[in-house]
Amino acid sequence: MGLTTLAIFVANPRKRRKSARVRCIVDTDATYSVIRSKILEGIGIRPDDEITLALADGTEITRSVGEALFQAAGKSRVSPVIFGEEKDANLLGGVALEAMGLFLDPLERTLKPTRVMLA
């Protein structure tokens, strides 16, 4: 099917007027979203912890993590965000998608509302 890239808005959850339009790869296999540090710092988001992440090839990396307000397809929700390095792709991951109640329609390559399951 290939990669789906969409433009979304990422905002500072404490100062929602501070936002950036970001082109992201929608990666439903990624747990967390990744946005380059330069973008996050530009809208006033600061890391509050560090996290060790496993890559697809099994290697581990450590990155800073914080919280961002993600806005896509008419929905918005605060979700963890990984501070990406310059070489890292911007990714919209599964936790942010689920928090917004969205899923990726792979045929239309669009985000659509989904039924959120409690149990």
Image (spheres, rainbow, N blue to C red):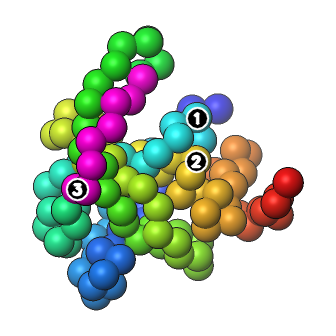
- SS at mark 2? helix
* 62 on left or right of 53: left
Residue ID at (37%, 66%): 68
Q: Kindly identify which residue carries mark 2.
A: 94
In this rendering, which labeled residue sits more in front, label 3 or label 1?
Answer: 3
Residue at 30% over, 75% down: 12
Q: Is residue 115 left or right of residue 9?
A: right
Residue type of the residue flagged with mark 1: Asp
Q: Earlier in the sequence, mark 1 or mark 2?
A: 1
Q: Which residue is mark 1?
A: 29
Image quadrant containing the N terminus: top right
Rounded to the nearest angstrom, the CA distance separating label 1 from label 2 is: 7 Å
Q: Nearer the viewer, mark 2 or mark 3?
A: 3
Residue at the spot of label 3 = 47
In the foreground, 24 or 62: 62
- Residue visible at 73% across and 67% down? 113
Q: Earlier in the sequence, mark 2 or mark 3?
A: 3
Q: Which residues are magenta?
A: 47-54
Q: Where does the image place residue 45, in percent across and percent down from the top left?
A: 22, 66
